[in-house]
Structure formats: C-alpha cells, structure tokens
Image (cartoon, helix red, strand yellow):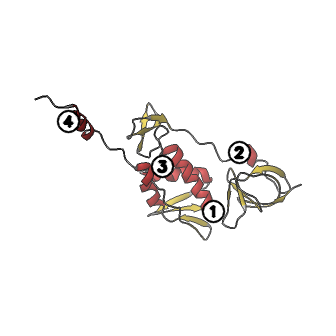
Amino acid sequence: MTASYEDLLKKAYTNITEPTATEERFTIPPARVFIEGKTTVLDNFAEIADTLRRDQDHLMKHLLSELGTAGKIDGTRAIFSGKFEQEQISTIIKGYVDDYVICSECGKPDTRLVKDARILMLRCDACGGHRPVRKRRATADASESSKLAEGAILDVTIQFLSKRGDGVVKMDRYTMYVANAKPGQSVKVKITRIAGSIVFTERAE
C-alpha cells in the first residue's frame, strides 16, 4: 500500500533533529573576582571554562595574554599577578567567547576548536559552518603605552567602568583610571602618577 502524502510528511518530520535552544540557554556565569593581597582571583574559572566547553589551559593563556600578566590555575580558580577589575576580566571573557566559541554562521555555541593544516579553526556542530579563529587585536597598541609618562597628555577612549565608577582604559600592561567618564567616551587626560601598572589621571583642557 502506497503511503499517503501526510504519512510521508509525518515520517520526514520525525527524522529531522529538533532545533536546539542552545542560544537561549547559553549563559556565561558572571565572573566572581576579588583581590587577594597583590593578586586577583577569578573564583569560578573552572565553571566558566566548563560552560564554554573549552580547555582550561587555552582560556587561561588567553586571559594572561590580554591582561599582560602572569598567573596560574589553582584548582577551580585562576590567580593573576596584579590587581584587576571584575569588569575588565568579564570583558576579556566576552571577547574570548566571540572569537573562540560562538559560531559566526548560526550564532550558537555548539562549536569545537580544530587544527586544519596548522590553522586553528572553529567548527560548528549545529550548522556545519567553520572559520579560522580570528586573532583579537591587543586592547591598545604597544606604541600607545610607550607614550605613558607622568605629565603626558593623551586622548583616550573609555573602555569600561571600575567598581568605583571611574572610567578604565587598558594600554598594553597598563590600566588607566579616568574620573567622571563613561564607556565609549573620548577624553583628553593628563597623567598625574604611574604606580606599577596603574596610571592615574586628571582631565586636561
């Protein structure tokens, strides 16, 4: 007996994989960051790596490179030399997700990192798309950080806010604080003091 059109259609639908709600349920755990002496601790590092389904060493290497510091994985935590803001680490993790996790074709996180002829590729299990992993540009050009000196006047663009509400600009290994500034705002500042990798400023006219 020949199957009816409706039966064939029903059979076809049963063989189709239901679209996942991955993009809806995919949520990056908020970074739990606190200062411990002269170090910064990312308390839920392992949880974030597990959620992203990425190797801890790969994520850690990216964080260390972007922060311009040294550090280590300590159990489920990541410890960085120096003092960094929670917003700064969260921004770096977001950038990692954009480059190393999310598929640019379908927007889902169902991806894997694979090597193809020594080129690191992001391959999507959801849609089959693949692309070379884009190398993120450094937060600021090294030539910019070479201009840092007490008394110098610079034009900078605020990247994010610190917990105290100050504007923050990352330049190579330096963190610059600008009072009364908002993310995306371009301001002219004068460097008043440099303490290690921390740069303090005041508005310049």
How far apart, in angstroms, are the residues tagged by discs 3 and 1?
Answer: 21 Å
Q: Which numbered mark, 1 or 4, is in the foreground of this view?
A: 4
The residue under label 2 is 142
Asked which quadrant contains residue 181, the reply is bottom right
Answer yes or no: is residue 175 visible: no
Where residue 113 appears, as percent x and y from the top left, is: 43, 41
Give the amino acid at mark 2. Answer: Ala
How far apart, in angstroms, are the residues tagged by discs 1 and 4?
Answer: 60 Å
How far apart, in angstroms, are the residues tagged by discs 4 and 2?
Answer: 65 Å
Where residue 150 appears, as percent x and y from the top left, is: 83, 57
- Tell which residue pokes out farthest to the bottom in this image: 37
Give the amino acid at mark 3. Answer: His
Asked which quadrant contains residue 122, the reply is top left
Q: Which numbered mark, 4 or 3, is in the foreground of this view?
A: 4
Marker disc for residue 58: 3
Q: Which numbered mark, 2 or 1, is in the foreground of this view?
A: 1
Q: Are marks 1 and 4 in contact (CB under 8 Å)?
A: no
Which comes before the other along the chain, label 2 or label 3?
3
118 sits to left or right of 136: left
Q: Where 7 sits versus 196, above or below?
A: above
The residue under label 4 is 7
